[in-house]
Image (cartoon, rainbow, N blue to C red):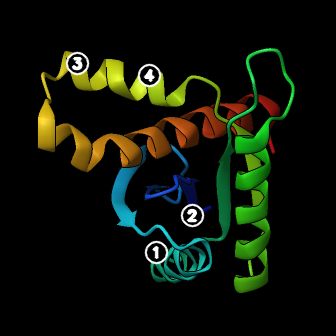
Amino acid sequence: MKIVSVDFGDSHTGIAECDKLEMIATPVCIIDERRFDVCADKVAVKITELGAELAVVGDPVNMNGTRGPRSEKCREFAELLRARLDIPVEMWDERSTTVSAHEIMNELNKRGKKRKAVIDSAAAAIILESYLAYRRNTHV
């Protein structure tokens, strides 16, 4: 199944996709948009262009498992996507994905503008990798 993941941000939203066999998550792009509704429009268009059958939105749950303001904003964003898409939109716990993305960028020695250009799509790919591992382990 073609799955697309979204790492929503206030100004940069990362997009990643997997192959139909759900083996590899690949960063796709960053959508630079600060306006909430316009960002949802642009993300929905990209998800449709990619031919997704399922969209996964990262949910930044607090480390203690509670939902804070950031999680609520991502949930609102997912609701906007649901209204714009004809495919399921799921939330996925993304705790520490941005930290992991920064660690990967450090290992690859990506700095400055190069890092900024890919960090959010890398985080989206990490979200998707986690989701794909869950699907493989639960035979969804």
Q: CA distance from mark 3 to mark 2?
A: 29 Å
Q: Amino acid at mark 4?
A: Ser
Q: Residue 48 placed where, x, y %?
A: 54, 81
Marks 2 and 1: which is nearer the front?
A: 1
Q: CA distance from mark 2 to mark 1?
A: 8 Å
Q: Earlier in the sequence, mark 2 or mark 1?
A: 2
Q: What residue did someone put label 4 on? A: 100
Q: Residue at x 62, y 79 (%)?
A: 37
Q: What residue did someone put label 3 on? A: 106
The circle on residue 2 is 2
Counting other residues with Cα less than 10 Å from the Cα at mark 3, is it few (<14), some (14-19), or many (20 or more)? few
Q: Residue 110 placed where, x, y %?
A: 14, 29
Q: CA distance from mark 4 to mark 2?
A: 24 Å
Q: Residue at x 44, y 58 (%)?
A: 11
Q: Amino acid at mark 2?
A: Lys
Marks 3 and 2: which is nearer the front?
A: 3
Secondary structure of the residue carrying numbered label 3: helix
Q: Residue at x 82, y 15 (%)?
A: 64
Query: Image quadrant for the N terminus?
Result: bottom right
Q: Is residue 19 above or below residue 96?
A: below
Marks 4 and 1: which is nearer the front?
A: 4
Q: Earlier in the sequence, mark 4 or mark 2?
A: 2
Secondary structure of the residue carrying numbered label 1: loop
Q: Earlier in the sequence, mark 4 or mark 3?
A: 4
